[in-house]
Amino acid sequence: MFNVKSLVAGIALLLLAGVPAQACTVPADAGRLAHQVVQRINEERERVSLSPLRKSPTLAHVAQRHACDNAAHNRLSHIGTDGSSPGDRVLRAGYAFAFVSENVAIGYLSPGRVVQAWLQSTGHRRNIFERRNDEIGVAVAVGRDGRRHWVMNGGKRRVARHVSRLTR
């Protein structure tokens, strides 16, 4: 004879395992928030005589997908739930890079606060002031618990090199 409680618990686990993560919630003012983060980062770079970063729609798209992934799974990680690294994600989006960096954060309500937190973290600060970055993409998503998940991707595109062949 089988245990009815065990059977019910097993069926519940199977049903829950098959439920996909909730869709991403993006704040209505996400574009403005991302713009303010980029603005603040460029102000900080200017203070140390670095060139401003140009907005990259591709890097912003990659950042949004990763912010949504983190938010949907209520986690904070540079590794995607599919096992992808920041480099994997930007390559998948068609961004052939010479350099790529990523900052992530959770829970900060304002662009100023998230940038300040990144500036107080050695690794994140290094990414903000990285000389090899010349483009940036920033995104924010909201998790099921209401906390904001922020992602900043910095990058530099790889320069295509054309090799000419000499013929005899």
Image (cartoon, rainbow, N blue to C red):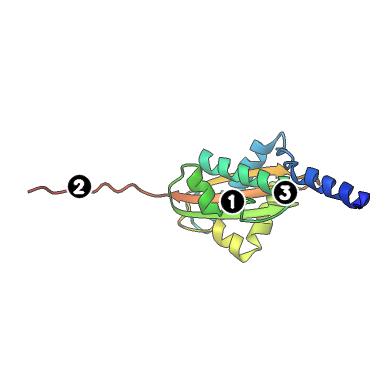
Q: In the displayed structure, does residue 116 sit left or right of residue 145?
A: left
Can residue 81 be spotted in the picture?
yes
Q: Residues within 10 Å of mark 1 (few under 14, many from 20)?
A: many
What residue is shown with label 2?
Answer: 164
What residue is shown with label 1?
Answer: 41
Residue extending furthest front?
A: 1
Residue extending furthest left?
A: 168
Q: CA distance from mark 2 to mark 3?
A: 49 Å
Instruction: Please tell me which residue is depicted at 51% across the width and 53% down the height of the picture.
Output: 87
Q: Of 50 and 57, which appears nearest the observer?
A: 57
Q: CA distance from mark 2 to mark 1?
A: 40 Å
Instruction: Please tell me which residue is depicted at 72% across the width and 48% down the height of the picture.
Output: 73
**Height in image: 28 above or below 96?**
above
Q: Secondary structure at mark 2?
A: loop
What residue is shown with label 3?
Answer: 73
* Position in image of residue 53 (x %, y %): 50, 48
Number of the front mark, 1 or 3: 3
Can residue 110 be spotted in the picture?
no
Q: In the displayed structure, does residue 79 sit left or right of residue 56?
A: right
Mark 2: which amino acid? Ser
Q: Secondary structure at mark 3?
A: loop
**Height in image: 156 above or below 22?**
below
Q: Of 40 and 5, which appears nearest the observer?
A: 5
Q: In the displayed structure, does residue 15 sit left or right of residue 85?
A: right
Q: Residues within 10 Å of mark 2 (few under 14, many from 20)?
A: few
Q: Secondary structure at mark 1?
A: helix
Q: Of 44 and 1, which appears nearest the observer?
A: 1
Number of the front mark, 2 or 1: 2
Q: Earlier in the sequence, mark 2 or mark 3?
A: 3
Q: Earlier in the sequence, mark 2 or mark 1?
A: 1
Q: Are marks 2 and 1 in contact (CB under 8 Å)?
A: no
Instruction: Please tell me which residue is depicted at 76% across the width and 46% down the height of the picture.
Output: 17
